[in-house]
């Protein structure tokens, strides 16, 4: 469901595996949750003396005119209500802390999961929908957790205890309650299924709307260049209409669910009042007993109202939990699973490598080598497979045939993340983060001293233009580096890559934003470094070969020539 071709699932079954995972989030809190449930049960027990005191007020204190006794009983009832209120506040605070910590850990696990998914997963994923799942569904899960742990479960405990009080007070009236509540449960089950279906439709429409907004923001310039504002507004309006319809249906049905429950509970109250009046007139009970039963029933009704209000949020949260759990369990194996960490010298070898993203081959038996401390060019027209070679070197994908080596070690044996930390990459269109130039250069390194940053910027031929800016390294770059030119963005990305002192530096199409002189200065600077890194320049510009020591020509996924410079 997080892929472009997927459609929402219509199953109404509870995903037991997802709920087992959800329950595991509270593994360290069972003791505290148990104590809170026990406190809720004890809280309900306090309602028994309250109802008995109410009966004594009506049957004894008022008829006998005992004002002092009336005041004492009233004070006792108030004290008991204050005690139950205090227990409620205390248990809710404890449960709230537990659920918020569980959701914090869940969200962290989600972020960690994103980094564990393969590059091919993101190639196929609908990122707008994925963003919605991460943000909106985790928020709905948070709401569900509060409704479940702080509302539904405690109120079930309290309702059970109040039911015992009602049986003690008058078992005959309680039978009427049972009959009416059986009808309420049946209606709840029927409406609950409908709420679940409408909730799923709403979540689908909301994910589509969220993805549409994300597209509008990301494609703003393209839309204006193409003068496609009208077309795009029409397309997004269809999503808005779908969202309005599904949200209206869901909200109305949730309202109908709550209203129906409230009406049935009110009918139950009236039925008890009528039946109790008949029992009083026939001498089977007293007015005080009826009022005490009615008071306990009012307490039960308030708890059942709370349970009724919690159920739609739990249904909605269940749908979100299912989607989030599918993200956790999505099969997206890493291309490599080795664990060996080496002191990389900068040598990379592709041996008879063939690769395809779909059925059409992109690389066909490619063999090439980047020796340590050597500058190598890989040239070829657009679409020849050059960027795919970079993706394979970075271990984003695994070739269908052939092998890759870092120095003399096959990729299958290596910890690829550790290898990447020794490789610097500057892509064709480097990612520039919102913030300052300094923020961008040091991203991924933590705290760095200024002299290291300046040295990296000087090697990247960036220091000169940075120092000309009014705020220097503290200059804001804007969203996606919009306040910088293409060449300035490329130089900042170069400084970021060089700051880690890589053993291999990959420059993907540097001539798109840097002129020949800048590239020549950069390569000269690199040659002067102690422990010269290997450099692989990916380019469609054949003039780049003058700056390198070895050139591979790639055409239609094949190496057609190897030339020493």
Image (cartoon, rainbow, N blue to C red):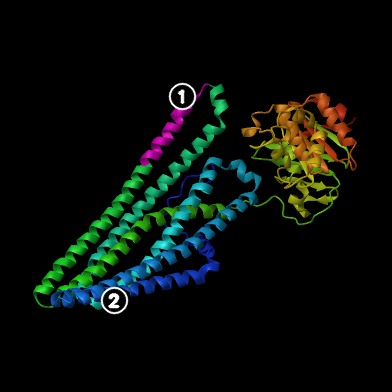
| Image x and y of residue 545, in percent | 85, 28
In terms of depth relative to the viewer, which is nearer, 359 or 69?
Answer: 69
Label 2 element class: helix
In terms of depth relative to the viewer, which is nearer, 392 or 42?
Answer: 42
Does the magenta run of residues contain 471? no
Name the N-terminal-most of marks 1 and 2: 2
The residue at which mark 1 appears reads as: 230
Number of numbered discs present? 2
In terms of depth relative to the viewer, which is nearer, 458 or 500?
Answer: 458
In terms of depth relative to the viewer, which is nearer, 201 or 88?
Answer: 88
Q: Is residue 283 left or right of residue 465?
A: left
Q: Is 56 located above or below residue 547 in the figure?
A: below
Contact (CB < 8 A) between labels 1 and 2?
Answer: no
Q: Main secondary structure of the magenta part?
A: helix
Q: Is residue 147 left or right of residue 352?
A: left
Calculate the distance from the C-alpha at mark 1 to the C-alpha at mark 2.
Answer: 69 Å
Q: Which of labels 1 and 2 is toward the front?
A: 2
The answer to whether residue 562 is seen in the rendering is: no
Label 1 element class: helix
| Image x and y of residue 521, in percent | 85, 29
Residue at 39% across / 35% down in the picture? 241
Q: Is residue 275 left or right of residue 206?
A: left
What range is drawn magenta here?
A: 227-245
Write down the quadrant of residue 506 in the picture. top right
The residue at which mark 2 appears reads as: 49
Q: Is residue 322 left or right of residue 499?
A: left
Quarter of the image for the C terminus: give it: top right
Write down the quadrant of residue 247 in the picture. top left
């Amino acid at each position: 469901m997080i892929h472009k071709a997927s459609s929402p699932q219509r199953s109404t079954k509870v995903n037991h595996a997802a709920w087992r995972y959800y329950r595991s989030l509270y593994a360290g809190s069972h003791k505290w949750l148990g104590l809170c449930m026990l406190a809720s049960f004890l809280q309900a027990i306090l309602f028994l003396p309250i109802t008995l005191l109410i009966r004594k007020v009506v049957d004894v204190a008022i008829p006998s005119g005992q004002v002092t006794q009336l005041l004492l009983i009233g004070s006792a009832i108030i004290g008991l209500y204050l005690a139950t209120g205090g227990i409620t506040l205390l248990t809710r605070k404890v449960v709230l802390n537990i659920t918020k910590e569980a959701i914090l850990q869940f969200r962290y696990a989600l972020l960690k999961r994103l980094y564990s998914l393969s590059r091919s997963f993101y190639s196929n994923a609908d990122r707008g929908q994925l963003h919605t799942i991460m943000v909106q569904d985790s928020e709905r899960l948070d709401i569900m957790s509060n409704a479940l742990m702080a509302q539904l479960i405690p109120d079930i405990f309290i309702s059970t205890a109040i039911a015992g009080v009602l049986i003690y007070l008058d078992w005959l009236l309680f039978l009427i309650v049972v009959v009416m509540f059986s009808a309420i449960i049946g209606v709840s089950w029927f409406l609950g299924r409908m709420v679940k279906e409408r909730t799923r439709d709403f979540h689908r429409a909301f994910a589509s709307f969220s993805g549409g907004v994300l597209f509008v923001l990301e494609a703003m310039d393209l839309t204006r260049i193409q003068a496609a504002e009208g077309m795009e507004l029409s397309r997004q309006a269809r999503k808005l209409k779908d969202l309005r319809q599904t949200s209206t249906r869901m909200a109305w049905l949730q309202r109908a669910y709550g209203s129906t429950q409230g009406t049935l509970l009110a009918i139950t109250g009236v039925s008890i009042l009528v039946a109790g009046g008949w029992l009083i007139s026939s001498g089977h009970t007293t007015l005080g007993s009826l009022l005490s039963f009615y008071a306990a029933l009012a307490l039960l009704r308030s708890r059942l109202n709370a349970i009724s209000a919690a159920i739609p949020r739990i249904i909605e949260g269940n749908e979100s939990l299912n989607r989030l759990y599918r993200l956790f369990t999505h099969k997206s194996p890493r291309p490599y699973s080795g664990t060996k960490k080496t002191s990389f010298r900068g040598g990379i070898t592709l041996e008879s490598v063939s690769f395809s993203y779909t059925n059409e081959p992109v690389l066909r038996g490619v063999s090439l080598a980047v020796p340590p401390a050597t500058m190598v060019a890989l040239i070829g027209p657009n679409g020849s497979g050059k960027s795919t070679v970079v993706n394979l070197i970075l271990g984003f994908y695994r070739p269908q045939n052939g092998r890759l080596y870092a120095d003399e070690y096959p990729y299958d044996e290596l910890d690829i993340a550790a290898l990447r930390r020794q490789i610097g990459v500057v892509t064709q269109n480097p990612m520039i983060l919102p913030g300052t130039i300094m923020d961008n250069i040091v991203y991924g390194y933590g705290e760095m001293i200024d002299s290291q940053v300046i040295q990296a910027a000087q090697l990247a031929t960036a220091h000169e233009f940075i120092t000309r800016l009014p705020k220097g390294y503290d200059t804001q770059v804007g969203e996606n580096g919009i306040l910088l030119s293409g060449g300035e963005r490329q130089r900042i990305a170069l400084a970021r890559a060089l700051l880690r002192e890589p053993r291999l530096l990959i420059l993907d199409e540097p001539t798109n934003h840097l002129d020949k002189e800048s590239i020549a200065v950069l390569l000269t600077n690199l040659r002067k470094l102690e422990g010269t890194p290997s450099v692989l320049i990916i380019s469609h510009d054949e003039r780049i070969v003058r700056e390198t020591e070895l050139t591979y020509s790639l055409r239609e996924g094949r190496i057609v020539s190897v030339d020493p410079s």
